[in-house]
Image (cartoon, rainbow, N blue to C red):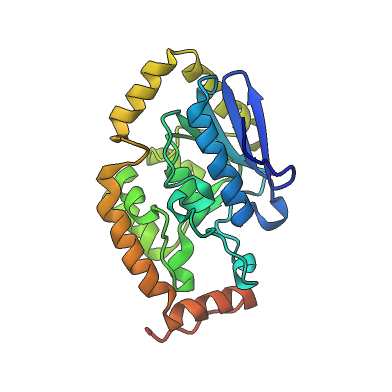
Amino acid sequence: MSGPVHPEKVLVERRGHVLVVTINRPEVRNAVDGEVHMTIGRLLDDVEADPDVRVVVVTGAGDKAFSAGADLKANARGETVLPPGYEHWGFAGWVRHPISKPTIAAVNGAAMGGGAELLLSCDLAVAAEHAVIGLPEVTIGMIAADGGPFRALAQLPQRIGMELVLTGDPISAARALELHLVNRVVPGDEVLGAALQLADRIARNAPLAVQASKRIALGLRNGERPAERLHWELTREHAHATAGSADAKEGVRAFLEKRPPVWTGR
């Protein structure tokens, strides 16, 4: 496969016809910065063109977090989390970058913000018993801008999805299983193994038939999901307006300073 793979921030391992992608930043709860975004985005382009890869598993390093979302500290330092010209890939180079190969999230810990949106963008998910899933953006004056609001409502009962989006409160792995948001819940040390078992089962099937089935099921055409177009347009409009608000600036400051925010509604 072509494309750079950072030996520290993203780990890539081939296991037969399965590719395991690990966000390897446990010291920041596997938060995603621009380098992670570019590495994974390029990797997915390679995966789509590689007939030998039939399934992709994505996980995080360690046992604390699948991903805490965007690296807000890097953002505060002036570093870009969405490199110019590659914003269309979405968070982690992944969430708006659909491929025809099945994808499985091995949720080894907390999946928060962009981490939850990464989970929501995968076809299947296996979660550790201690994992939690949440979209806390509203608690810091922002919105979940990588598919969280509309994908949560597509994958959960409407009122449960609205509660997740509007309160910012996370749900447990057990609750996620009850709501069919994940396929399996297993002890933490078994999460990758369970995801690989599921991946291997899929990889034993005829790859062209599997990929065609995924395209039909999700309405995939030419590398995008046209049915989501309106939702992405609304996301872009509201994310731009919200990000420039005084509340958004206050929310990020309060988060970094570890204090309660003071909202003004402006």
Q: Is residue 194 left or right of residue 176?
A: right
Q: Does residue 258 lie above or below 233 as drawn?
A: below
- Does residue 133 appear in the picture of this structure? no
Q: Does residue 109 lie above or below 15 as drawn?
A: below
Residue 60, x across and y down, in percent: 63, 43
- Picture quarter with the C terminus: bottom left
Q: Does residue 109 lie above or below 190 as drawn?
A: below
Q: Residue at x 43, y 44 (%)?
A: 120
In depth, the one of 155 and 39 nearer the eye is 39
Q: Does residue 127 lie above or below 236 as drawn?
A: above
Quadrant of res 225: top left
Residue 38, x across and y down, in percent: 58, 49
Q: Is residue 181 left or right of residue 254?
A: left
Residue 86, x across and y down, in percent: 49, 53
Q: Residue at x 66, y 41 (%)?
A: 4
In depth, the one of 106 and 183 nearer the eye is 106
Residue 29, x across and y down, in percent: 65, 54
